Amino acid sequence: MVTGAKGMLGRDLMGILHSAFSKDEVIGWDIEEIDVRKEDDSVSKIAALRPEVVIHLAAYTDVDGCESDQEKAFGVNAEGTRHVALAASKCRAKMIYLSTDYVFDGEKREPYLESDPPHPLNVYGHSKLKGEQYVQEGGGDFVVIRTQWLYGPFGKNFVESILRQAGEKKTLSIVDDQTGSPTYTVDLAKAIRDLIQADARGIFHVANSEICTWYGFGQAILNLSGIHRVKVLPMSSKELGRPAARPSYSVLNCQKLEKETGRTMRPWSDALKDYLSTYHRPSADPMSR
Ligand SMILES: NC(=O)c1ccc[n+]([C@@H]2O[C@H](COP(=O)([O-])OP(=O)(O)OC[C@H]3O[C@@H](n4cnc5c(N)ncnc54)[C@H](OP(=O)(O)O)[C@@H]3O)[C@@H](O)[C@H]2O)c1
């Protein structure tokens, strides 16, 4: 069963799992079915289903919102995860938990390994790390998947935001002092399927390969969409002034995934081309761009 099944990753994951397994073997729930903050309800409903694998995606994912609503951040991301982990252990299911590169502080200057010590800079990162700890303390089989910079067809994301702003403005200023790897939800969903099929256990880093800053990512989105009339300027995180601090470098080393499943994550630019050509075919009229 999948929690957060109607979220950005959840919808793609449900599609990938429905093609890998039979449809009635995969159950997706979102907040309408269970609010993971409610312990008794979550534990009893999941336990009654007796799943073999619980894939826990449900989360409060507004990174800046978490700074001003710590109660919700820890209630959903930490306590909610504890409730789901409790349910998984009751029915001896494997627990798969989606975590984040924001558990790291970005001080390292080479790709983070699964064994590197976490040290979050923001409330979201702290709450997701607490969730990781609950999953590991649960005592059963678990997989923790740390990923980053997600975009896909089913949610608000950076690609959609850049394309929307390009339609409204002549100049875009984008942060150039955070480095990571944009990750396509479809590629991540396939890696999750592979980890299930390989019966993997432990912590895994999963992101598309090769790195960029948000500024480089923004430039690529516009170039690949054939939009050349918008000027892109680099800016610092300080200038942007978001409430939550972000790591300046949060590249994830994904070699453990490759060893375990044989899956090599493709470069982010190839995945982006695929996404844009599937969901944003360039207009036939070049004057309109
Ligand atoms: N997006 C990223 O860049 C990113 C990066 C690293 C890790 N992750 C992790 O990957 C997972 C999936 O992310 P995503 O981007 O697909 O997130 P998302 O689009 O925000 O989806 C999360 C889903 O969980 C639901 N939810 C929220 N609170 C809930 C609750 N109390 N009980 C049950 N369901 C609840 C949300 O419903 P509502 O929409 O109604 O709130 C939403 O459908 C999350 O665990 C996230 O922490 C994401």
Image (spheres, grey):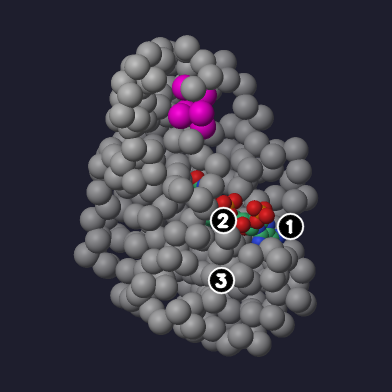
Characterize the magenta stretch by its predominant secondary structure. helix
* Quarter of the rendering containing residue 275: top left
Amino acid at the residue labelled 3: Gly
Residue 289 in the figure: left or right of residue 155 = left
* Quarter of the rendering containing residue 218: top left
Mark 3 beta carbon near ligand 1 (under 8 Å): no
| Secondary structure at numbered mark 3 | strand
Q: Which residue is mark 3?
A: 28
Q: Residue furthest front?
A: 285
Amino acid at the residue labelled 2: Gly
Q: Which residue is mark 1?
A: 75
Mark 1 beta carbon near ligand 1 (under 8 Å): yes
In this rendering, the answer to whether 80 lies above or below 99 is below
Note whether residue 262 is visible. Answer: yes
For image coordinates 58% across by 38% down, the residue present is: 121
Amino acid at the residue labelled 1: Gly
For image coordinates 36% across by 25% down, the residue present is: 222
Q: Which residue is mark 2?
A: 7
Q: Is residue 185 magenta?
A: no
Mark 2 beta carbon near ligand 1 (under 8 Å): yes
Q: Quadrant of the C terminus?
A: top left
The x and y percentages for residue 68 are 75, 38
